[in-house]
Image (tube, rainbow, N blue to C red):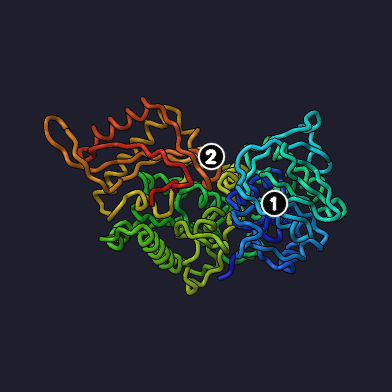
């Protein structure tokens, strides 16, 4: 099964490659570069030079890493990148690595350095030329490292030093190779975005060709080219933002040649299946099919308690139902779905990434399905998907809909899934969402929902002892779901939600609020 990716689009010919050494901020570097209007891709740190050269990047960034350059398993890069004539920027570990590789002296630190550090600009060109730096010789940078560059390689100038006289930035202007010891991509480094833009615009000579509008234009054109004049595409719809954006992109590109299947597994929020069906049947030109498979999924999930097994069962059954329906629709050549970049990362599909949780729309599609795969959002972050949706003219009611996991409420019910548990959780979740909306807090939140914890506790209802389930409330703020912080909802709002859940749902015994950020937690409970 082949993947259709937007690798040849006009806006993507100008790109920056980020070599990922396993640093916690690698994805954040990518976000900052795209925010600057430049397309970028992450590649494994050990990607061979010939593969990098084939991508024709305008620049290469070496990310940070938790490793030491002197460690026995320290990640390395192909040394040919330093001789390829393409500008290079090393960040933290990336700077230490290039300094060592090119003959500089890197000192193995006795202690790690984390947090805000003051540094002084010695040479403004080319990284510190923004107006922000003109009247300031000293700046703050966010440090997170153990080793440090003691002596820059031959041909390099020291561009900045810390208040302790340690090297904070270096550069070889002739070879256009630069390094910064701090992290310009993080919020804690004032002016960090300007430093990255200076590298992109002044060193790499990039222009702002990456935008939601250019992406839509390129993607629509490429969908037409890939599908041809006669072939048909079937799209897997969940009702979430990602698959909805894909559906409207297909509608613009292909019209009636795009077909849509919504598999109702019964694990959706209260009344959501009906709302989704009405939206798509009214707005899309191609054939839309609503498949009621609720009983089928419940039977498959009976007795299953392991979260990963739940996800795999739901994914496999989703594909089975989808396959049966798609094959009954006639001559279909392509399958489109709303996979986005965080799905790829969390499923471990990027080399070196740990599997955090399986996504049923990443991998697992059987080869015998016989369709080529179209995933036009595969390299986008969630906020970029929403911007694409704006360009496609989607209403705010869709674009502002909070993310919903593919397995639905199955991963918000700890333990076995039953019809009774689903009904209970749907009611609790609806109450929470309704009250958050009334309090006008929903615009500030990335995601908010209820969880059936699988724990029963003693309570009192009326004058009687009551033994029933604990409902957990979860609300987070985030930009892209890669990291998230728990939302500081008003206490009176939480009190009202708790009173309604325990008062209107006879089974509910207690309500608790989850105050765990990501990391160390995940947004979902399973």
Mark 2: few/some/many CA within 10 Å (<14, 14-19, 20+): few
- Please tell me whether residue 373 is drawn above or below residue 521 in the rendered image: below
Give the mark nearest the N terminus, 1 or 2. 1
Q: Which residue reaches farthest left?
A: 464
Q: Which residue reaches farthest front?
A: 110
Q: Which residue reaches farthest top?
A: 492
Viewer can see residue 218:
no
C-alpha distance separating marks 1 and 2 = 26 Å
The quadrant of the image that shows the N terminus is bottom right
Q: Which residue corresponds to the image point at 80% horizontal and 28% vertical from the top-left? A: 135
Mark 1: few/some/many CA within 10 Å (<14, 14-19, 20+): many
Nearer to us in this view, 401 or 121: 121
| Image coordinates for residue 437, horizontal then vertical, percent | 42, 31
Element at label 1? strand
Q: Which residue corresponds to the image point at 31% horizontal and 39% vertical from the top-left? A: 428
Viewer can see residue 344:
yes
Res 3 quadrant in image: bottom right
Nearer to us in this view, 189 or 197: 189
Relative placement, left or right, of 157 versus 513 is right
| Image coordinates for residue 387, horizontal then vertical, percent | 60, 43
Res 73 quadrant in image: bottom right
Relative placement, left or right, of 165 versus 523 is right
Query: Which labelled disc corresponds to residue 39?
Result: 1
Query: Which labelled disc corresponds to residue 395?
Result: 2
| Image coordinates for residue 234, horizontal then vertical, percent | 51, 61
Q: Which residue corresponds to the image point at 22% horizontal and 44% vertical from the top-left? A: 456
Residue mark closest to the camera, 1 vs 2: 1
């Amino acid at each position: 099964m082949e993947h259709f990716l937007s690798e040849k689009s006009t806006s993507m010919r100008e790109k920056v490659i980020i070599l990922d050494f396993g640093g916690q901020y690698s994805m954040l570097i990518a976000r900052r570069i795209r925010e600057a209007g430049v397309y970028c891709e992450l590649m494994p740190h050990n990607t061979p030079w010939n593969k990098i050269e084939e991508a024709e990047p305008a620049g290469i960034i070496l990310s940070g890493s938790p490793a030491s350059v002197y460690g026995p398993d320290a990640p390395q890069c192909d040394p040919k990148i330093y001789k390829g004539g393409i500008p290079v920027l090393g960040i933290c570990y990336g700077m230490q690595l290039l300094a060592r590789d090119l003959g500089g002296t890197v000192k193995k630190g006795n202690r790690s350095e984390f947090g805000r550090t003051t540094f002084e600009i010695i040479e403004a060109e080319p990284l510190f030329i923004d107006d922000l730096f003109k009247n300031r010789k000293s700046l703050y940078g966010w440090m997170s490292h153990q080793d440090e560059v003691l002596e820059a390689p031959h041909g390099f100038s020291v561009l900045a030093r810390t208040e302790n006289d340690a090297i904070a930035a270096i550069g070889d202007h002739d070879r256009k190779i630069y390094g910064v010891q701090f992290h310009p991509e993080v919020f804690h480094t004032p002016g960090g975005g300007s430093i990255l833009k200076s590298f992109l615009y002044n060193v790499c000579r990039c222009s702002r060709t990456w935008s939601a509008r250019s992406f839509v234009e390129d993607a629509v054109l490429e969908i037409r080219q890939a599908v041809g004049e006669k072939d048909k595409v079937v799209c897997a719809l969940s009702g979430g933002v990602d698959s909805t954006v894909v559906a409207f992109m297909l509608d613009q590109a292909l019209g009636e040649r795009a077909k849509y299947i919504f598999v109702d597994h019964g694990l959706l929020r209260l009344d959501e299946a009906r709302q989704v069906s009405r939206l798509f049947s009214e707005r899309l030109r191609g054939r839309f099919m609503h498949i009621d498979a609720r009983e089928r999924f419940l039977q498959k999930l009976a007795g299953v308690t392991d979260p990963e097994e739940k996800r795999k069962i739901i994914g496999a059954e989703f594909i089975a139902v989808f396959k049966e329906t798609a094959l009954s629709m006639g001559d279909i050549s392509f399958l489109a779905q709303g996979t986005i970049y965080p799905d790829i990362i969390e499923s471990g599909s990027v080399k070196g990434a740990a599997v955090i949780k399986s996504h049923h729309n990443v991998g697992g599609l059987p080869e015998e399905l016989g369709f080529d795969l179209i995933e036009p959002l595969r390299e986008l972050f969630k906020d970029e998907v929403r911007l694409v949706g704006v360009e496609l003219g989607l209403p705010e009611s869709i674009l502002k809909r909070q993310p919903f996991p593919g397995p639905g409420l199955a991963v918000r019910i700890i333990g076995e899934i039953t019809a009774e548990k689903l009904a209970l959780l749907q009611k609790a979740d609806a109450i929470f969402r309704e009250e958050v909306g009334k309090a006008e807090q929903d615009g500030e939140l990335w995601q908010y929902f209820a969880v059936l914890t699988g724990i029963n506790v003693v309570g009192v209802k009326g004058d009687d002892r009551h033994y029933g389930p604990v409902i957990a409330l979860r609300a987070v703020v985030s930009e892209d779901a890669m990291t998230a912080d728990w939302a500081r909802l008003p206490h009176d709002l939480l009190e009202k939600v708790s009173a309604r859940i325990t008062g209107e749902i006879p089974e509910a015994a207690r309500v608790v609020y989850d105050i765990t950020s990501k990391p160390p937690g995940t947004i979902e409970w399973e």
